[in-house]
Amino acid sequence: MKKWQIYEIFNSLNNVLAGSTTKKPNEPYSYSLAIHTGEKVEKIELNRKKFEKYFPDDFKFVSFLQIHSDIIIDIDSFKLTEKWHKSSIKADGIVTTKKGVVLCILTADCLALLAHDPISKTIGIAHAGWRGTHKNIAKKLIEKMQKKGAKTENIKIALSPSIKSCCYEIGEEVAKNFMHFKEALVQTGEKKWHLDISIVNKLQLMDLNIKEENIEVSTICTSCKNKDYFSYRKECGCSGRFLNFIALI
Ligand SMILES: [Zn+2]
């Protein structure tokens, strides 16, 4: 199996595979992997087949309809029969303790949280835009993992590339939800702010006693690095989605 994860925090662990795909032309995952963005379904299915090749044959891929909620699903109660679990269930996070289940979150500017407790062998993933961040989905993810035996002192977590404060302009109605996160919010005009949701999520995780050294925050801004990553804002809503994933192997 090709090793291609981009998160150093999981590098020393040999029982987990985690990463984010890109659209870099010379890399194996340089494709959109989202069905719902208006591209031809056959093309996306072909892209997904290319992605599957980097996993053992019996691995299953799981994602839900992401709706900017704080709903986290324990996938272990589901019977996975299809290669890509097709579901009409709405959720923004998934946890498992089973090997061979690839937890997937599709993003283009939003943040993905990829979490792993190597002792209890629990993994989780979540999708956080500003709404999910405001609902503290990071906390909901960790709580769901704790129900499966994970402990905060053991959890390692990576925060994916996302749109950063250099590019993420927001109005007052959004900014007012984050006024107490001074490090994440920069005022740029009378009613204009710039927000970094990865910083908010990091602070929310540290509030739960996740150790700072166990949190890896990608420095990549998806809008600045739009050549390599899909960006919903930069591409005026017409972007594909890259896939963030974590699996026990
Ligand atoms: Zn930027």
Image (cartoon, rainbow, N blue to C red):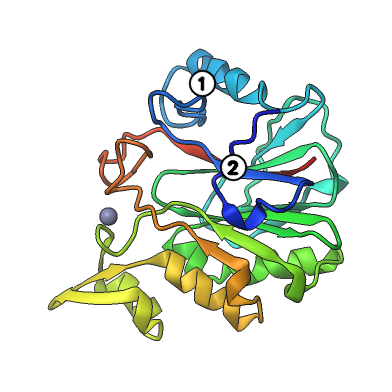
Q: Residue at x 83, y 27 (%)?
A: 81
* 94 versus 150 height, above or below: above
When asked about the image quadrant of residue 144, the answer is bottom right
Residue 78 as seen in the image, left or right of residue 8: right
Ligand 1 is located in which of the four quadrants?
Answer: bottom left
30 and 186: which is toward the camera = 30
Sort mark 1 into few (<14), some (14-19) or many (20+) by Cα contacts within 10 Å.
some
The amino acid at mark 1 is Ile
Q: Residue furthest bottom?
A: 180
Which of the two discs, 1 and 2, labels the residue nearer the N terminus?
2
Task: Note whether 120 is above or below 33 in the view shown.
Answer: below
Alpha carbon of mark 1 to alpha carbon of mark 2: how far?
21 Å
Q: Is residue 12 left or right of residue 176?
A: right
Which residue is at 50% across, 31% downward?
Answer: 34
Q: Are marks 1 and 2 in contact (CB under 8 Å)?
A: no
Where on the picture, by quarter, is residue 122? Answer: bottom right
Q: Mark 1 or mark 2: which is in front? A: 2
Per the image, label 2 sits on a secondary structure element best described as loop
Circle 2 residues within 10 Å: few <14, some 14–19, many ≥20: some
Q: Amino acid at mark 2?
A: Gln
Quick one: SS at disc 1?
Answer: helix
- Quadrant housing the N terminus: top right
Label number found at residue 106: none
The x, y position of residue 71, in whole percent, is 65, 59
User: Which residue is denoted by mark 2 in the rendering?
Assistant: 5
Establish if 176 lies above or below 26.
below
- Label annotation for residue 44: 1
| Residue 180 relative to residue 245: left or right | left
Q: Is mark 2 within 8 Å of ligand 1?
A: no
> Which quadrant: the C terminus?
top right
Residue drawn at point x = 51 percent, y = 24 percent: 28
